[in-house]
Amino acid sequence: MKTLEDFLNDLGARESGGNYKAFNKYGYAGKYQMGEAALIDSGYYKKPSGKYNNDWTGTFTGKDGVHSIQDFLNSPKAQENAQIIFKKRQWGYLKACGADKYVGKVINGYQITQSGLLAGAHLKGAGSVSAYLKSNGKEIGKDAFGTSVESYMRKFAGYDVSAICSA
């Protein structure tokens, strides 16, 4: 079975080609293309207002020596740490909306797994994953590039992410 390390490396490869310095036109940053909400959840950033638009006008907390978006882009260690923290937070969100109860079920011809749920949440959030599951695969959210939650859930199924999901 593929490991958590494999999951993270494959997710990073899909998101940015594994490039820690990547920054896309929507303001998503680093290897995992994390936005403001993700960095808030992982404890690296504070937003001055409730709207997340990835303009990076808030303040960084200084965690792992990150005081700016440039510091974040220049720190593989901070990006890896932030991703683990964020994935644990996402698993909490997935559990809160009942998505974890779908693990093992088959929707649209493939089996729902913990790693697939985490990948879907990475792409579009726990709410979109929950909507997909509750609609039995009929409501398929997509990101700004047209990538679907279902495609991420399929692509990233079958990794051992128990270190995240048992935390």
Image (cartoon, rainbow, N blue to C red):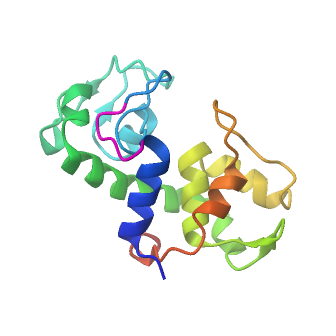
Compared with 92, 36 (above or below) is above
Could you tell me residue 107's position as x and y percent?
81, 68
Asked whether 83 or 76 is in front, the reply is 76
Q: Would you identify the image quadrant in which residue 113 lies? A: bottom right
In this rendering, the count of numbered labels is: 0
**Extreme-bottom residue of the structure:** 1
Q: Residue at x 36, y 43 (%)?
A: 31
Compared with 108, 139 (above or below) is above
**Extreme-left residue of the structure:** 65
Could you tell me residue 131's position as x and y percent?
76, 51
Q: Would you identify the image quadrant in which residue 70 lies? A: top left
- Per the image, is 67 magenta? no
- Per the image, is 21 magenta? yes
| Quadrant where the C terminus is found in the figure | bottom left
Could you tell me residue 125's position as x and y percent?
59, 46
User: Left or right of 164: which side holds 75?
Assistant: left
User: Left or right of 32: which side holds 58?
Assistant: left
Could you tell me residue 126's position as x and y percent?
61, 51
Residue 95: in sight, yes or no? no
Asked whether 100 or 77 is in front, the reply is 77
Q: Which residues are magenta?
A: 17-22
User: Left or right of 48: which side holds 111?
Assistant: right
